[in-house]
Amino acid sequence: MAGNLVAGGVALQPSAEQVALSTNYITTFDFLNQYLPDTYEKEFERYGNRTISGFLRMVGAEMPSNSDLIKWAEQGRLHTKYTTCTLATYTGAETVQTVTVPLAQLNPGTGAIAVRVGQTILISDETAASGFSNKAIVTTVGVGAANEFTIAYYEATQAAYAAASTISMFAYGSEFAKGTNGMVGSLESDDLFLENNPIILKDKYAVNGSDMAQIGWVEVTSENGANGYLWYLKSEHETRLRFDDMLETAMIEAVPAAVGSGATTAGFIGSEGIFSAVGTRGNVWSGGFPVALADFDAIISRLDKQGAIEENAIFLDRQFGFSIDDMLAAQNSYGAGGTSYGLFDNDEEMALNLGFTGFRRGYDFYKTDWKYLNDPTMRGDLVGGKISGLLVPAGSTSVYDQVLGKNAKRPFLHVRYRASQTEDRRYKTWMTGSAGGAQTSSLDAMEVNFLSERCVCTLGANNFVLFQG
């Protein structure tokens, strides 16, 4: 019988406040009470490790930059294929026909098509019901319109295409008669030029000098190992940890400010985070997550059409991870009625492992839980705009770095931070005031300031897959 988790719930009330509360400092001591409480010396870490950063450290790198704009070029396709082209009506007597390429597929710089006289092409009818295909040779280009060219069929009885058929075509070779001139025209590389700009992130922790003199009665600790009996130290360390998390989540979630948006009007430009880059230039699986091999076959088919990276890591939430485990377990012929999959030898003292770390099907896929997607204070409890996973290719790619002026190997994901010989803005922290060792002003307080200026570069976003819903 199924049960429901109804008791307890998840506490989402913020514990960080901008004022000193009774929960931060001990303010009531009744020494007239003969029954003094027994107290535990150390606070209990009921939420375990509360930080969610670490994703970029696993998959990327950090590199300095001395500019407020990062630009790079990514290779285009080596071969050209045109889709949704229009083919003139064929009645059975034509030996030559005209092909019209959609204007949107013309080269944006020259307004021309990458088809030349003498090239041999394969034509495929995009109507699934017919499935016709033919071979032809290009006879003229740009006669009548820049997006048109004529072809002569090799077949004597070519397929009978319907009126204004929609076809796709690509060049597979060329043929020239004896004693003729060579190929007319040449093809230039068509790179994709991309850019991103760093954003400035800031935070601050402040405590007045009087409160710094108060000593608590419980030893406090933090995820970075800080401990002591001074409550303000705990708050300062947690501010630092919170800022560290924001350095990563900003690189994941940042979006460019759209033209005419309120952010643009206010003078902000935003930045392109990982989710934004993959959602715009990559692959998106929507409507849940893949739960069957057929679903992953569709993803693999898409990856075949992209960079075909051999090894990939899927960073996912808990439910997506369980679904992959169930899918892999179901591949065992005995898995439906028992637990024989994996290295199970029926040892009663053996802990049964019901999970998988990865699988191979055409490519290697390794999965790992992403705490950011599970944390209820971040994306863990979202309904609208939910993201359940991100497929990240392993290794590095070659791009043209405009600063270096040459091709360079770069991880698919990496962070660029502002730095020069005199100013390093990767992670700046400094104290101001007149308390806690600071002697910069007459302010009776200690202010700890944090600053970073950075952006993330998502190279080859077409090799990434974003799982939504």
Image (cartoon, grey):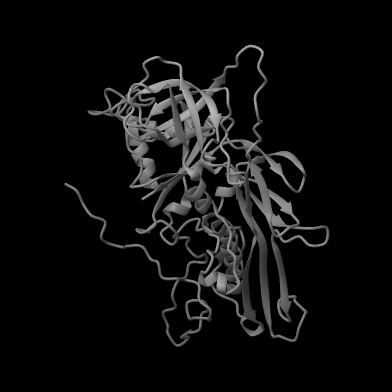
Compared to residue 81, the image places residue 118 above or below, namely above
Q: Nearer the viewer, residue 109 or 435?
A: 109
Specify whether 23 is left or right of 242. Answer: left
Q: Nearer the viewer, residue 276 or 416?
A: 276
Compared to residue 185, the image places residue 242 above or below, namely below
For this orientation, the residue located farthest to the top is 178
User: Residue 414 location, x and y as percent?
Assistant: 63, 47
Count of numbered circles on the image = 0
What residue do we see at 73% from left, 52% from top?
Answer: 64
Specify whether 294 is left or right of 401. Answer: left
What residue do we see at 52% from left, 30% from top?
Answer: 308
Within the image, what quadrant is residue 47 found in?
Answer: bottom left
Residue 358 appears in the figure:
no
For this orientation, the residue located farthest to the right is 421
Compared to residue 396, the image places residue 362 above or below, namely above
What residue do we see at 56% from left, 64% from top?
Answer: 242
User: Residue 133 location, x and y as percent?
Assistant: 39, 22
User: Residue 82 location, x and y as percent?
Assistant: 48, 34
Q: Nearer the viewer, residue 400 or 52?
A: 400
